Amino acid sequence: MKQETASDRKVVIEQAKRFSESMLWKAQREYFDKEGINAWVNQVPFYITSNPFIANVYMQVVFGLICDWVKQHPEAKNHPFYIMELGTGSGRFSYYFVKRLMDLLEYHGMSDIKICYVMSDFTKHNIQYWETHPALKPYVDKGIIDFALYDLETEKPITLIKQNIKLSPEVLVNPLTVFANYIFDTVTHDSFMVHEGKLYELLVSLSTEESNLDGIKPKDMEKVSVDHSVHEAKPNYYHDPHLDAVLDLYKKSLNDTSFLIPIGSIKAIRYLRKLSNDKLLIISTDKGYSSLASLENLGHPSIAFHGSFSMMVNFHTLSEYFKNSGGDAFLQTPRRGIKTSIFASGLKLKELPNTWLAIDKHIESFGPSDYFNLHRRISDSFNECELEALSSHMALTGWDPHMYMRLSQRFMTLLHDADSEAITFLADNMPKLAENYYYMPASDCVLFEIAVFFHAVKRYKEALEYYQKARPFVGEKFGLIYNTALCKHLVKDNKGALEDFKTALELDPSSDDTKEWIAFVEKEMAGG
């Protein structure tokens, strides 16, 4: 029999706490504050809500709202439309959204509409990253993008860093639009259970091995065990009639199940409603439940750890809460995967025809969850796909650099036998791919892969253009300098080619190919 060591001994670090008051949430905040932008480098999943497709979906809804509001309130043109993103994180979604919205406003002759997109987060580290990002800078310089340090679980003033103004009912004259992507799943929840017609609160206890402790704090949250104890919930639990009505609905309608109440999100919503004169539109995409039926027969809530941790969002609760308090909500018909939901306060969605049309077309008919299901299928089987199918999928993605990086080797393999029409289609859309490049630390550079594409199809001038564009992001790497030298030689710039070949040789003195090219170009320049 193995004898238990002191380091293996389980230690209880928290006993029977209300879930929203657990130390887990403090650890969550500390993680994001410590990691900053690095949390999104191969740790916290975020692609699903940070791609050109979903940005276009949100843009269509917001554009519909702007058109409806200006038509119904012509004086709205005199005031900015504020759009605030909660828990912005990397900023990639922000860039895609703002770029598309400004392009569409210009296309429709609506450039006089004032837009202020507020990227917000509770940690200064992320704001420092956004402030120096080359993709965001043009919009920041024009006052279209601003930043705010905002903790969505505290009612503290929201001050725009660049303009130095506080968001208030006086400033937010037009409806405030709020984006909440993969954020409601990471802020506080309360946990409940319904059994035989009674409502119970699930209190959490945490334990871990002694070797996983630094003082009283766990070193690795994934090694923490979460246990639940059951206590009958008191009446009027929240002392909020709109939210207590939801608990009462679940008590009467659900049979034997557990569920979460996203109390941190509701606290943020209350505050944002006050700030916005109760004219608020929220668009949220996350994993979660969006119908009463989906809440049946669930076990105790599980916690998904991925650097940070996350929970399933109870979108049904948010929908009922808005409706109980005089607002409106749209929940997608059930389907597998992420859910995109719309919540409104002081607005009736069906009284906004352009907004409602965008919701129906871009969320209900074919939305982010549908897109991601197709994306996942292509990602899993791209080596079986022909060039035409991959090219069509790239068009569906909105020319997404992340997707192209996954497919680039397959594209290169298929180009050898491709006809001119297929090549022209790809070549004509490579600028769109380049415009969507949003640099992140430790990520591959799509500009380099675009250059490789043009190099492969013998369009050397365009290849050179993209090799040069990639240089600030890739750095002085042998492959880039060597390829640049090859293209310069092929466009008859032997002087430039020789300089680059010599630089490449300094980077890799063992490269025999580079030595041979230097000798060849020198001979050619000498007239040999």
Image (tube, grey):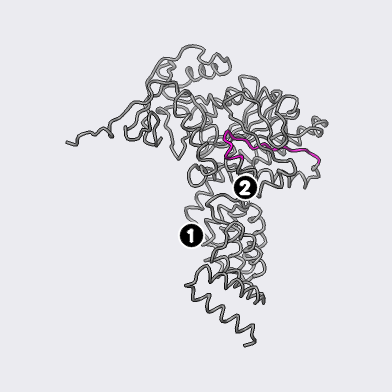
The residue where tag 1 is placed is 384
Between residues 132 and 89, which one lies in front from this camera angle?
132
Q: Residue 277 vs residue 516: left or right?
A: right
Question: Quick one: SS at disc 1?
Answer: helix
Compared with 285, 400 (above or below) is below
Q: Residue at x 81, y 45 (%)?
A: 109
Q: Which stretch is magenta?
A: 112-127
Residue 376, position as x, y percentages in the image = 50, 49
Q: Are the residues flagged by discs 2 and 1 in contact, CB closer than 8 Å?
A: no
Q: Which residue lies furthest to the top in this view?
A: 235
At label 1, which amino acid type do we have? Answer: Glu
Q: Which residue is drawn at 55% across and 29% down?
A: 315
The residue where tag 2 is placed is 52
Residue 140, position as x, y percentages in the image = 70, 43
Q: How many labels does the image show?
A: 2
Between residues 213 and 285, which one lies in front from this camera angle?
213
Whether residue 284 is visible, yes or no, is no
Mark pair 2, 1: CA separation: 25 Å
Q: Residue 187 carries which label?
A: none
Q: Does the magenta stretch include residue 114?
A: yes
Q: Which quadrant would residue 434 be assigned to in this image?
A: bottom right
